[in-house]
Amino acid sequence: MSRTGLVLFAGLLAIQFLTQISINTALLGVFPPEATSQLEGMVGLTLPVSGTAGALLFVLTTLLSSAFFVVISRALARPATELATLPRELYTRRVGRASVSMIGGGFIVGLSVSVGLVFFVLPGLFLGACFLFFIFAVGVEDRRAISALKRSWNLSRGHRIKLGVIVLLSGVIGGVVGAVGAVFELAASPAVSEIATNTISSALFVVLYGIMAEAYLQVRDGGVGPSGRSGTTTEGHHTVDQY
């Protein structure tokens, strides 16, 4: 409940709505015009533009979300006393390069975890725990995609069971949001369901990213708790020997 948390909630909510709307709009564009009017009440929130424009908006939103996750990692990986501020370096320092790394490495993480979940679930949980700190290695430490994956893998050693609990928590949040969405869709409409699920998931996932950030700082700094996060200066820069 800080300024940082509220701004990140608003930003994540906006990105989720843009993503949902762009997907819905692109999906409607696949069908012939005579079927569009019948499907509009089933799809949810859309824009009065073509399917091609919806697909383009989805691509742009994906790029925007990558930059936003760079900001999330930097904003939350700070001492609690600094969360009332949002200095410019959070969203200006090498954000373009970091966003590209976030996209490339995020694709690898998403693919590997998804494949791991297909094979008896446990491999997916293991890989999710191993790559849990990927976004912080990119955003906070300015690492490229492959280096960030290696960094997260090394940081997670000795902590993977506990980090697996965080991965499970993300799954629980997804399940709760999905259940709430199904209830609203049955009781109201797809649009109301999307508004409810996007709002709830944005709030819960900001909290989850805060937990991930705290875990990252404790592991990186050798178990230092929230009241004494060693290794971080007031500007959020770090010395070379920490890495």
Image: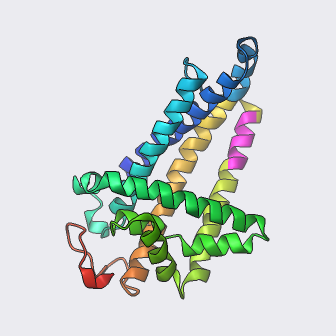
Residue 1 vs residue 35: left or right? left
State whether residue 219 is above or below residue 108.
below
Q: Quadrant of residue 70?
A: bottom left
Residue at the spot x=60%, y=24% of the render?
Answer: 51
Q: Quadrant of residue 113?
A: bottom right
Return the x and y of residue 75 as percentages of the image width and height.
33, 59
Residue at the spot x=32%, y=78% of the render?
Answer: 227
State whether residue 32 is above or below residue 7.
above
Instruction: Pick the quarter of the image with the N terminus.
Output: bottom left
Any magenta on residue 179? yes
Any magenta on residue 93? no
Give whichever of 134, 223 is nearer the camera. 134
Give whichever of 189, 153 is nearer the camera. 153
Residue range of the region highlighted in magenta in the rendering: 178-185
Determine the main secondary structure of the stretch shown in magenta.
Answer: helix
Return the x and y of residue 165 as percentages of the image width and height.
62, 74
Residue 236 vs residue 68: left or right? left
Return the x and y of residue 65 as percentages of the image width and height.
45, 47
Instruction: Pick the quarter of the image with the C terminus.
Output: bottom left
Q: How is the image coloured?
A: rainbow
- Residue 85 visible in image: no
